[in-house]
Image (tube, helix red, strand yellow):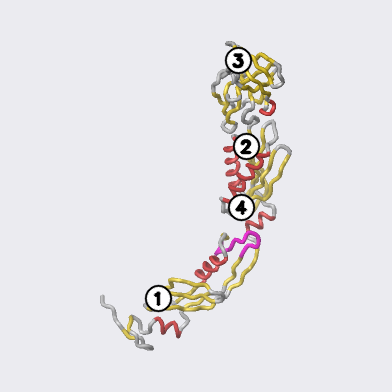
Amino acid sequence: MHRIIVRCVICGKEGEYRICGECLAERKKVAFIENFNLEICSKCNSVKIGKSWTKIDFSEAIQRMVSEKLRVEPNFDVHEIIIMEKAAVLRGVLNGDPVEVTVPLSYRVRRISCPRCSMESGGYYESIVQVRAVGRELREEELERAKEIVRKAISESEGEKEFLSKFEIVKKGIDFYLGSRKLGEKISKKISEEFGGRVFETRKLHTRVDGRERYRFTFLIKLPEYEDMDVVVKNEMLYVVKNARLGKGIDIFTGKHANILESSVAVRRKSLGWGIITNLDESSAEVMTENGNVIMVQRPFGAEVGKEVFVFEYRNRTYAFPVDL
């Protein structure tokens, strides 16, 4: 199919249109930008684009709004938009000719509170994650690590309700009040995986909205009573905790590894004494303690003369096991 070449009725330039792009741009309003309001959250600086709030910088927000509010002639193909202080420069092709058109730009910036920040500042929450340890208080390292897990989970989430309303240090642990059930599930799973705890979920009716019941959910994480290097008892057998997170221990007499879930603490690591093996026979070991006392104990796994051992008492008997068990 042959192109029909005509001359511009104004400047005489040959082309496909009776008026070339340059002449049309000089004589007609070929583009304009509708006035708009730019809504920015005064707390988190997220920007409302359409119906959604997103965290982008100011210049990108203006660029997106200009692209959304730009209206052009059907034959004007805009390739580039350059934002100035009170105008926008449009570069593209109009009626087959490269053109550059400057159009006025007018907008208002409104500082408001986004829905997420409004709910957060209002104390809104849908779930509580409670972290506790069985038979003991949480260690400072466990408290700080739990806080870190919560911060990271929130930073990786973008939902409107993915926020922390507050946290409370309570007598035996810590409580996190979270904006959504989904976030509570995610955080409780991560904490239990890290520390080896079990999660118990409950729910309570909070309110009814438009006839629909709204619940609040509680995720109780129970961390193990034992910690690494504690001595625990299970089925009348004594084990040293080697991996509290995975619930793994080692029998102090046979050296066999075992699952220590559902065990109870016999002696805490901090309560273990110290000694050194001075003599051995097939069934017993002679140990000199840190106080200079010489005691006899049942021979532990891995015993050697001169080897350092931990010493402890349980049910009126004294036991020992190598520090490198």
User: How far separated are the C-alphas under marks 2 and 1?
Assistant: 64 Å
Give how far across and how far down residue 171 sits, in percent: 73, 38
Q: Are marks 1 and 4 in contact (CB under 8 Å)?
A: no
* Mark seen at residue 93: 1
The answer to whether residue 73 is left or right of residue 42 is: left
Q: Is residue 197 above or below residue 78?
A: above
Helix, strand, or loop for circle 3? loop
Q: Residues within 10 Å of mark 3 (few under 14, many from 20)?
A: many
> Which of these two is toward me, 67 or 268?
268
Q: Residues within 10 Å of mark 1 (few under 14, many from 20)?
A: some
Helix, strand, or loop for circle 2? strand
> Which of these two is toward me, 256 or 12?
256
Q: Which residue is mark 2?
A: 200
User: How far separated are the C-alphas under marks 3 and 2?
Assistant: 41 Å
Residue at screen point 44% across, 82% down? 25
User: How far separated are the C-alphas under marks 1 and 3?
Assistant: 91 Å
Seen as rendered, the residue at the extreme left is 1
- Which span is picked out in magenta? 40-51
Q: Are marks 3 and 2 in contact (CB under 8 Å)?
A: no
Q: Is residue 266 above or below residue 155?
A: above
